[in-house]
Image (cartoon, rainbow, N blue to C red):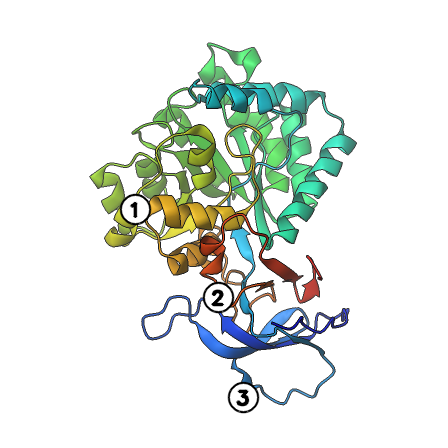
Amino acid sequence: MSAPAPGGISPAGDLLLTNIGELTTNVAVDGDPCGTVRDAAVLVRGGHVVWAGPSDRVPDDGGGVDVVDAGGRAVIPGFVDSHTHLVFGGDRAAEFAARMAGESYAAGGIRTTVAATRAASEDELRQRLRAFVGECRSQGTTTLEIKTGYGLDIATETRLARLAAEVTDEVTFLGAHVVAPEFAGRADDYVDLVVGPMLDAVAPHARWVDVFCEAGAFTPAQSRRVLEAGRAKGLGIRVHGNQLGYGAGAALAVAMGAAAVDHCTFLTDDDVVALAGSETVATLLPGVEFSTRQPYPDARRLLAAGVTLALASDCNPGSSFTSSMSLMIALAVREMGMTPAEAVWAATAGGARALRRTDVGVIEPGAKADLVLLDAPSRVHLAYRPGVPLVRRVWKDGLIAGPTG
């Protein structure tokens, strides 16, 4: 394949991307949820898609755009990573090494990161966060959700939310990650803090509230209390659940109309039926299973039941220290029974649904021009060539935001 023309960088985000071998629009047509178009083009004005379709039907829009020849390569929507923990201090490599030597994963390791995060300066946290965001962009992720949860006190949780809000609109308050160490044995007292002054301080910086409804973290009753308090503050609901064993997380998420329940490793038949009959997205996080040697979720079972799936990285220092959505796709295909098309959809449109967004994860008129040019003729290569850096160029709002080689 010949290299694409360099193209300029229009301050308005005006672009014509043409000679696309395979375009994934995620606008379902004729039984194809990926809305695949061959020999395609995408026209962008003001950072938004104004047209997408066959190259021989590009509308005459007056010119004045940067023209980029895709050289027959594939183009997909930017990845929508709907579950990350990117603001933290410290490192847990020793914990990872211990797990690989046979120790089991438990939620208590989070407290190690809490201590390091509390000790880190704001500048250290900001610099590290921005480096992670750049890492994500270079790999094709254009929309990020970022959680708090490594402060577990009012001042640090507020700082984490404020820093996250500097780089994304999708900030999640996760003060109920685990019980803060100074509240050991007093979980209900800690929940009082979370739903009271901590929520008051963090809510202005957040869009979502989340809770880790799991043995070793918070009970169903405590979890419901956190979610109800967040909802009363105008925050949307998300749930960590069913990661370490069977539990109430998925059922609670459905009952409360949560946008998503994340992990879903251990689900009963009733959980699956409930998810299939709801608008709650099941977000699968295969990087966690890869890094903890837990069993992988059965995506085929969920898809057969009609559950809407998203894939996300859960990038965090303890259980999934990777920001690669391409790796999530490869693991979903190899280990969880998804087809490449299903996995790519889940990593883009599925993530958008988990965030209740309609302006990302798709390539259609009105959507944000968040585009990824692959150095491959097909999206299948994201699973077919695991570990290979196939993202050639990234546009965020029509502007170059990633590799330009």
The three-letter code of the residue at mark 1 reads Leu
Q: Is residue 200 above or below residue 217?
A: below
**Where's residue 299, x and y in %?**
32, 47
Mark 1 Cα shell of 10 Å, populated few (<14), some (14-19), many (≥20):
many
**Where's residue 212, x and y in %?**
44, 30
- Disc 1 marks which residue? 275
The answer to whether mark 3 and mark 1 are in CB contact below 8 A is: no
**Mark 1 and mark 2: Cα distance apart in space:** 31 Å
Query: What residue do we see at 67% from left, 25% from top?
Result: 155
Between 127 and 332, which is closer to the camera in this rendering? 332
* 159 relative to 274 in the view: left or right: right
The label number, if any, that marks residue 378 in the structure image: 2
Residue 257 in view, yes or no = no
For label 3, the SS is: helix
The answer to whether mark 1 and mark 2 are in CB contact below 8 A is: no
The label number, if any, that marks residue 56 in the structure image: 3
